[in-house]
């Protein structure tokens, strides 16, 4: 039963959507942890970093 469900969740590229979602969730949690840590311990660096990203997006 479980293998049928996992087989059903496979998309065209052969990547399990379930594995993809788990991977995105782990990366997202790490991103949130890093963001909160920087916001608490290095707020100036975080602001400069985000402004740098915004300026880079404006250039393109």
Image: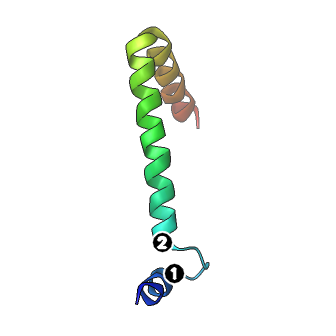
Q: Residues within 10 Å of mark 2 (few under 14, many from 20)?
A: some
Q: Nearer the viewer, residue 53 or 33?
A: 33
Q: Are marks 1 and 2 in contact (CB under 8 Å)?
A: yes
Quarter the C terminus occupies: top right
Measured along the vertical axis of the image, is residue 4 above or below residue 57?
Answer: below
The image position of residue 52, as x and y in percent, is 54, 22
Find residue 21 and report its image quarter.
bottom left
The image position of residue 33, as x and y in percent, is 43, 31
Q: Is residue 28 left or right of residue 55?
A: left
Question: What residue sits 48% from the left and 38% below the top?
Answer: 30
Q: Nearer the viewer, residue 30 or 46?
A: 30
Between the C-alphas of marks 1 and 2, the distance is 6 Å
Question: What residue sits 50% from the left and 46% below the top?
Answer: 27
Question: What residue sits 46% from the left and 11% below the top?
Answer: 42
Q: Is residue 20 left or right of residue 39?
A: right
Disc 1 secondary structure class: loop
Can you identify the residue that label 1 sits on? Answer: 10
Find residue 14 and report its image quarter.
bottom right
Disc 2 secondary structure class: helix
Quarter the N terminus occupies: bottom left
Can you identify the residue that label 2 sits on? Answer: 17
Question: What residue sits 47% from the left and 24% below the top?
Answer: 50
Q: Residue furthest front?
A: 1
Q: Nearer the viewer, residue 18 or 48?
A: 18
Q: Nearer the viewer, residue 13 or 48?
A: 13
Measured along the vertical axis of the image, is residue 34 above or below residue 6?
Answer: above
Measured along the vertical axis of the image, is residue 16 above or below residue 57?
Answer: below
The image position of residue 17, as x and y in percent, is 48, 71
């Amino acid at each position: 039963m479980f293998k049928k469900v996992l087989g059903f969740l496979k998309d065209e590229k052969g990547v399990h959507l379930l594995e993809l979602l788990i991977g995105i969730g782990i990366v997202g949690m790490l991103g949130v942890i890093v963001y909160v840590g920087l916001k608490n311990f290095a707020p100036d660096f975080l602001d400069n970093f985000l402004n740098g990203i915004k300026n880079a997006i404006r250039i393109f």
